[in-house]
Image: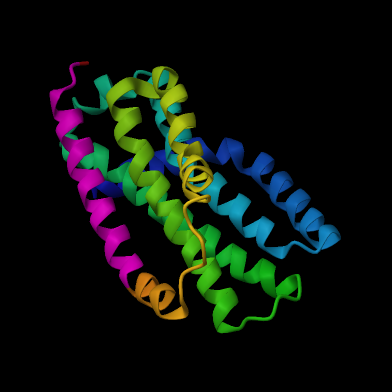
Amino acid sequence: CQMKGLILKDFINLKKQSKLIGLVALFYLIFSRATNNNSMFGTIMLMIFAMMPITALSFDEKANWDKYGLTMPVSRAEMVLSKYILGVILSVFALILNFIAQILLGTEMNIENIVSILVIFGISIVFISLLLPIIFKFGVEKGRMLMFVVLMLPTMIILFFKDFIKSPPSDEVIEKALYALPVVIIVILILSILMSINIYNKKEF
């Protein structure tokens, strides 16, 4: 019940952003159609919704919510876990929205395209897992630069290693990687939750 209340509180706070997100979604839906780049919409939406727990934490930080919240019958672990559950719920919502958008945009729902959408969803969960411990440790304001580095990390890794890769991986390697991906994402998520709880338990408000 307490956990449900924490998540509901975040949804009420994030409701202020709903009109802006709706306008952004409409813009990228039209832009994706105009440029014939249907995957852009899904990628942008999943990244935006993956960042929403950070926005919720920003609202909490400005209102000094933690100091008040911890006087209630809520554990520190529940305070942390609520943000992860919020992030997963919003990412699943963005995933469903992406599937609907792809159908509206006329994307053929073959195995390759479905896997691509699910991979982007997985990446959004990894971003949540990487960003939340940083925010719990340093706060939203101090953690902005580190957040930027984390968001840019995949691009930097690709640029660094692209000259060392002489040929693309075989279909067999890609298939094995796709099977392993859900397990890797779940492990990263669990480790992130444990790390954030450990960080939050040491904080003083």
Is 8 positioned to the left or the right of 55 in the image?
left
**Vertical comparison of 177 with 44: above or below:** below
Q: Nearer the viewer, residue 73 or 127?
A: 127
Looking at the picture, how far across and down is residue 133, in whole percent?
29, 35
x then y, percent, for residue 36 = 80, 64
Q: What sort of colour scheme is used for the picture?
A: rainbow
Please tell me whether residue 163 belongs to the stretch shown in magenta: no
Q: State left or right for residue 149 relative to residue 82.
A: right
Front residue of 200/6: it is 200
Quadrant in the rendering for residue 131:
top left
Q: Give the tally of numbered discs.
A: 0
The quarter of the picture where the C terminus appears is top left
Magenta stretch, main secondary structure, is: helix
Is 75 on the left or on the right of 159, as rendered?
left
The answer to which image quadrant residue 66 occupies is top left
Q: Which residue sits at x=35%, y=18%?
A: 64
Q: Residue 156 placed where, x, y %?
A: 50, 40
2 to 149, vertically: above or below: below
- Closer to the camera in the image, 153 or 191: 153
Q: Is residue 27 visible?
A: yes
Q: Position of residue 122 (x, y in %)?
A: 42, 60
Q: Is residue 196 magenta?
A: yes
- Residue at the right extreme of this rendering: 34
- Which contiguous range is marked in magenta? 180-204
Q: Is 144 rendered above or below residue 114? A: above
Residue drawn at the location 54% of the way across and 58% of the way down: 94
Which residue occupies 47% across, 55% down? 91
Q: Is residue 7 above or below residue 122?
A: above
Identity of the residue drawn at 55% across and 75% down: 114
Q: Is residue 12 visible?
A: no
Q: Quadrant of residue 108?
A: bottom right
